[in-house]
Amino acid sequence: MSRNWSTEAIVLKTHRIGDNHKGVLLCTPFRGNISAIAHGAASQKGKLRNAALPFARGTVYLYEDKVHNSMKITDFDVTILPEGIRAQIQSFFAASIAAEIMLLGHVESESREMFDLFAACLDFLEGFAFEVTENPQRQVHPMSILALFLWNYLLFAGVCPDLDFCGTSGRKLLPDQQVYFSFLDTAFMHTPEKHDMSGHHLVLPPPSLTILQWVKEKPYTRTGKEALPSHTITPLYNLGIHLVQQFIGRKLNSVRTAAGMFRI
């Protein structure tokens, strides 16, 4: 590969280097997450200042020094600067959780699909941030957008629990009925087992299972901004977060920071 190359990218995280520069962590569709230095990005007049803004998206131009194993951004053609996400606090926290998941649990084998999933999530959150000012009663909540992102992520990562059959009886799960998720058995069930009666399970009211089976069959670009029944959003979000954190192997700082911020 040439030392100079370009790629689509979304800014995941930045940190200051000295007075004028910033380190930038980028999510890319074919090389996963990459770190690069943006010289002058911390300066108000620097041409790369947009490269240091979280969730900025576009084409990044890079110079790779293979001898010193380092990369620097030479230019960043920003096509989407999500001002709405940064202005609407619930959208911002939802985007931050999605970004931390991409940062800690990026699945290299599904890099393109994961990139598109993350990009679509940001698009939906940006749309909500602008539309909520015009219609405060809008049903599609950032927590709903994020919940569907989580379950699509689990499907792409190959760690989504079986959505079709009971984990104990093997009988087919009925999508229009209430189901239980056992944290001990990591499976959906018709009824909780005796050893689960102490609270090691989560109740998912109907039509939660129908929604998850629908997510499995339809692309996120079609389902991500659908209005979910309000009583299903919190359990789907809570279980999705639990399973993602289990897969990543650690608690997400952004989830703790956002606690109490989402209200349905």
Image: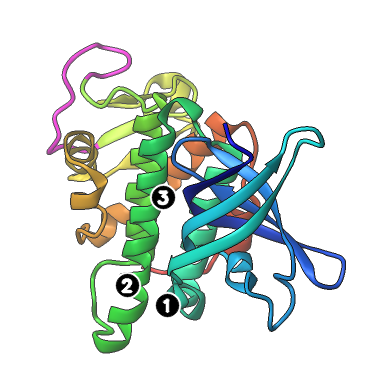
Residue farthest toward the right in the current orientation of the protein: 18
Question: Residue tagged by mark 1?
Answer: 84
Question: Residue tagged by mark 3?
Answer: 118
The percent coordinates of residue 145 (x first, y second) are 33, 57
For the residues bearing labels 2 and 1, Cβ distance under 8 angstroms: yes
Amino acid found under the numbered disc labelled 3:
Phe
Q: Quadrant of residue 96?
A: bottom right
Region of the chain picked out in magenta, as a range: 165-178
Q: Would you call the spot at circle 2 few (<14 residues within 10 Å), some (14-19), or many (20 or more)?
A: many
Tell me the tag on residue 128.
2
Amino acid found under the numbered disc labelled 1:
Gly
CA distance separating discs 3 and 2: 15 Å
The percent coordinates of residue 62 (x first, y second) are 61, 50
Amino acid found under the numbered disc labelled 2:
Phe
Q: In terms of secondary structure, where does tag 2 sit?
A: helix
The numbered mark, 1 or 3, whose residue comes first in the sequence reads 1
Q: Is residue 177 left or right of residue 97?
A: left
Q: Is residue 119 left or right of residue 253?
A: left
- Kindly identify the residue that appears in the image at 24 percent across and 81 percent down: 137
In the image, which is nearer the foreground, mark 2 or mark 1? Answer: 1
The numbered mark, 2 or 1, whose residue comes first in the sequence reads 1
Identify the main secondary structure in magenta: loop
- Kindly identify the residue that appears in the image at 52 percent across and 35 percent down: 31
The percent coordinates of residue 120 (x first, y second) are 33, 54
Quarter holding the C terminus is bottom left
